Amino acid sequence: MRARDILLEKGKEVVTIDAGRSIHDAIGKLNEHGIGALIVTGEGEEIVGIITERDILRKCGDHCVRLKRLPTQEETACPFLVQDTMTKDLLIGVPDDDPNYIMGVMTKNRIRHLPILDEGSLVGIISIGDLVNAHLEEKVFENRTLKDYLSRNSTPAQVEKRRAMLEDFD
């Protein structure tokens, strides 16, 4: 399995936002699509970064702390743009990346979303949840294959004994 296989399964749609849009626009898009990250584009649809829920919470939380009080009604709107909040040092993956490698990159860098580029073009984004789902599907398939193999190459008594042992892992 490779990154391209995960993208084929989940779909390649990537939601983007212009760097000059407001944080509130980003929050609206995140909520509308039920996602945790947006790819940020600049002039000519060039990828300039990524903005995540975590980025927004940090920026808006810091703003409230600087006020040293609860914001007034007029101050409740977070006054920042996506370009002020996004992560600019973008880590990327490629379609041939192994999911275990991607998981290692995410874990080491404490990120949950990795854009996938193929020859400079954005082809998808993989989240840690996508990796967990792919890993689970792979393990379920392996488990089923082993059970089928054992069933074909065993007496009925051996099959039942092994099935009882394997049920502890289901």
Image: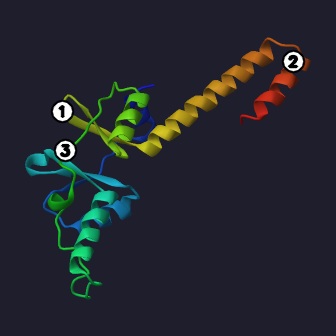
Number of callouts in the render?
A: 3
Q: Where 134 sits versus 19, above or below?
A: above
Q: Is residue 136 left or right of residue 126?
A: right
What residue is disc 3 on? Answer: 89
Q: Which amino acid does the dot numbered 1 rest on? A: Gly
Q: Mark 3 or mark 2, which is nearer to you?
A: 3
Q: Residue furthest front?
A: 68
What residue is disc 1 on? Answer: 120
> Residue 168: where, in percent of width, then height?
76, 35
Look at the numbered disc 3 and give the secondary structure of its residue.
Answer: loop
Look at the numbered disc 2 and give the secondary structure of its residue.
Answer: helix
Quarter of the rendering containing residue 145: top right
Whichever of labels 3 and 1 marks the residue nearer the N terminus, that label is: 3
Callouts 3 and 1 close, C-beta under 8 Å: no
Q: CA distance from mark 3 to mark 2?
A: 56 Å
> Residue 37: where, in percent of width, then height?
32, 53
- Specify few, some or many for label 1: CA neighbours under 10 Å numbering under 14, 14-19, or 20 or more: few
Whichever of labels 2 and 1 marks the residue nearer the N terminus, that label is: 1
Q: What quarter of the picture does the C terminus occupy?
A: top right
Q: Residue furthest left?
A: 43
Q: CA distance from mark 3 to mark 1?
A: 16 Å
Residue 24 visible in the displayed image: no
Q: CA distance from mark 2 to mark 1?
A: 54 Å
What residue is disc 2 on? Answer: 158
